[in-house]
Amino acid sequence: MTGDTVVPDVGSAGNAEQKGLSRADLAADWCTQFDRWFRDVVAAALPEPTAMVVGTADAAGRPSGRTVLLKRYDPEGFVFFTNHTSRKGAEALANPYASLVFPWFAVGRQVTVTGRVGPVERAETEEYFASRPRGSQLGAWASPQSQVIPDRDYLVERQREVAERFAGTDPVPPPPHWGGLRVAPDVVEFWQGRANRLHDRFRYRRTEQGDWIIERLAP
């Protein structure tokens, strides 16, 4: 292959006019605004409405990203669960800042978040883990997430061993290296697609004094 591949300028809200977002439309706080939009995407029956891209970086600042599922949100932040020895878990604990992206492009919207990340209380992890299907509970024990493995048979055998280990135990307890991470936002941005790339962007930003302000950003 030679030369550059030119990507056409297409995408959500590229030319079609959509309902805009004004300052008067916004809730007073980011959590209420997020809840409004989240309920909208659930009502629109988008596939995987809780899917979000989590960005982390290692101690040297090298970034990585992946898609995970949001499990809880409240004024304290956004919570997801993972193996803390995985790449995202290890990076989040070594360099405690993260970003989130909710790509709701089917409805012409996106939410981005940046803030500090840290583990939730163990009781919260245990409560959530107990609600998971048993197969998922066993899988959390079986998979050495992000580690190199020889083949799929290795995972199947690990799953069999774990199933035998916890036979008769209900619910299966969470592994000590598995738990929730909460991203406590400093910034939450709401993006509404508009025609001709003149999108509406509003940012809720925490000041150094701990207050929140709302700012309109150029697209």
Image (tube, rainbow, N blue to C red):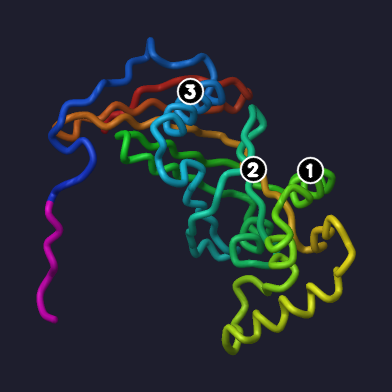
Q: Which residue is mark 1?
A: 124
Q: Which residue is mark 2?
A: 79
Mark 1 and mark 2 in contact (Cβ < 8 Å)?
yes
**Residue 36: numbered disc:** 3
Report how far apart the C-alphas of labels 2 and 1 lie in the structure. 10 Å
Mark 2 and mark 3 in contact (Cβ < 8 Å)?
no
Q: Amino acid at mark 1?
A: Glu
Q: Label 2: state its secondary structure.
A: strand
Magenta region, main secondary structure: loop
User: Is disc 3 surrounded by few (<14), some (14 to 19) or many (20+) residues within 10 Å?
Assistant: few
**Residue 74: numbered disc:** none
Q: Earlier in the sequence, mark 1 or mark 3?
A: 3
User: Is disc 2 surrounded by few (<14), some (14 to 19) or many (20+) residues within 10 Å?
Assistant: many
Q: Earlier in the sequence, mark 2 or mark 1?
A: 2
Report how far apart the C-alphas of labels 3 and 2 lie in the structure. 18 Å
Report how far apart the C-alphas of labels 1 and 3 lie in the structure. 25 Å
Q: Label 3: state its secondary structure.
A: helix
- Where is residue 51? Give x, y as percent: 49, 47
Mark 3 and mark 1 in contact (Cβ < 8 Å)?
no
The residue located at (74%, 54%) in the rendering is: 179
Please state the extent of the stretch shown in magenta in the rendering: 1-8
The residue located at (56%, 25%) in the rendering is: 31
Does the magenta run of residues contain 4? Answer: yes
Q: Label 1: state its secondary structure.
A: helix
